[in-house]
Image (cartoon, rainbow, N blue to C red):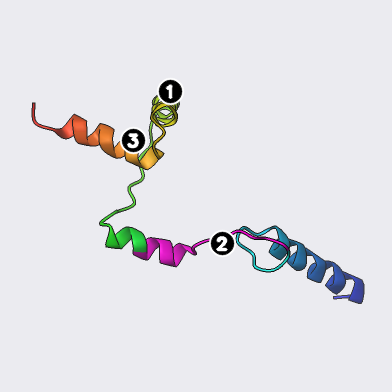
Amino acid sequence: MKKTGMAKSDAKKLMGKMLAPGAAGFGNTEAAAVDKREQRRRDQALGLVPFAVKLNSDLVAQLQALAKDSGKDLNEVVADVVTRGLAPQ
């Protein structure tokens, strides 16, 4: 690689670090973001399990609207809807 190519590569790496969420230095005063491994540990401690499903886009829009109206996280709203749906009648 030529010297100019290496300089471009270094500049891209530096810009990526500057724009990364939770990057220390570079004027970001936000707390560092939790990495995926730590978030996975926290979720496991709470008994949460990732569960991927494919839903119709209209249904997803309804769930998102319900979450926005109630001020809850989408995960909480879906858990509530599923819990109510599975409750014995």
Residue drawn at (80%, 71%) of the image: 10
Q: Give the range drawn in magenta.
A: 27-41
Q: As drawn, is 33 to the left or to the right of 77?
A: right
Residue sitting at x 43%, y 23%: 58
* Observer-nearest of 73 and 29: 29
Who comes first in sequence, dot 3 or dot 1? 1
Quadrant (top left/top right/bottom left/bottom right) for the C terminus: top left
Instruction: Nearest to the eye among marks 2 and 1: give it.
Output: 2
Q: Position of residue 43 (x, y in %)?
A: 34, 58
Q: Dots 3 and 1: beta carbons under 8 Å?
A: no
Q: Could you tell me if the residues under marks 2 and 1 are in contact, i.e. CB atoms within 8 Å?
A: no
Label 1 amino acid?
A: Asp
Residue type pointed to by label 2: Ala
Q: Is residue 48 left or right of residue 26?
A: left
First-in-chain label (2 vs 1): 2
Crowding at label 2, few (<14), some or many (≥20) Cα neighbours within 10 Å? few
Name the residue rendered at 35%, 62% in the picture. 42
Q: Which amino acid does label 3 sit on?
A: Val
Residue at image mark 2 = 31
